[in-house]
Image (spheres, grey):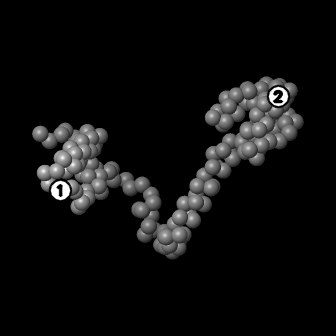
Amino acid sequence: MLVICLVQGSIADATTLEGAREAVEEATEELSLLGSLQFVGNLTQRDELLAAALHHYVDGRKVEALQQFCEGLKIVGALDALKAHPTVLKSVFLQDQKPLLASEMIDQFKTGRVSEPGSNRRRMETRTIGFWRDWLLQVEGKKLPN
């Protein structure tokens, strides 16, 4: 929301230096949290302020998430393997060009543990699995078997 306010709001819309300064003053708290608060001496500096705020908002938010992701990979020992063999593990982290099929999703969620045959719980599980399969096939665009 802050980015929308900055770009489409009064800071970006200000046509005079005084208007830009007033708009920056209104957004002082948000800009200081982003680390983008600076004195606006001319409209070019206003544009630089907006660019800095947008850069932090877009790029700065990714950095912490990527650091946490790398830390998680390091904990399980996958980060070293990824660095040592990047081409081998590429398919694990990058989207495959082959579309995901309903049959593959069904196979992914198969379980060997089901309730006792004839029990109410087993009937509920069977109904749920049926609904799940029907939904997957509908999403994939295939007709349901009768």
Does 56 appear above or below 3?
below
Question: Callout 2 environment at 10 Å: few (<14), some (14 to 19), or many (20+)?
Answer: some
Query: Is 68 displayed left or right of 130 in the figure?
Result: right
Quarter location, residue 131: top left
Q: Disc 1 designates what residue?
A: 116
Mark 2 lies on a secondary structure that is: helix
Mark 1 lies on a secondary structure that is: loop
Query: Is 44 displayed left or right of 112 in the figure?
Result: right
The one of 56 and 118 positioned closer to us in this rendering: 118
Please tell me which residue is depicted at 45% across the width and 64% down the height of the picture.
90
Please tell me which residue is depicted at 32% across the width and 51% down the height of the picture.
100
Query: Is 137 displayed left or right of 92 in the figure?
Result: left
Please state which amino acid type lies under the numbered disc 2.
Glu
Q: Disc 2 designates what residue?
A: 22
**CA gap, disc 2 and disc 1:** 70 Å
Q: Position of residue 64 (x, y in %)?
A: 62, 55
Does 56 appear above or below 20?
below
Q: Is residue 104 at all visible to an observer of this figure?
A: no
Q: Is residue 95 at all visible to an observer of this figure?
A: yes
Q: Position of residue 86 (x, y in %)?
A: 49, 69
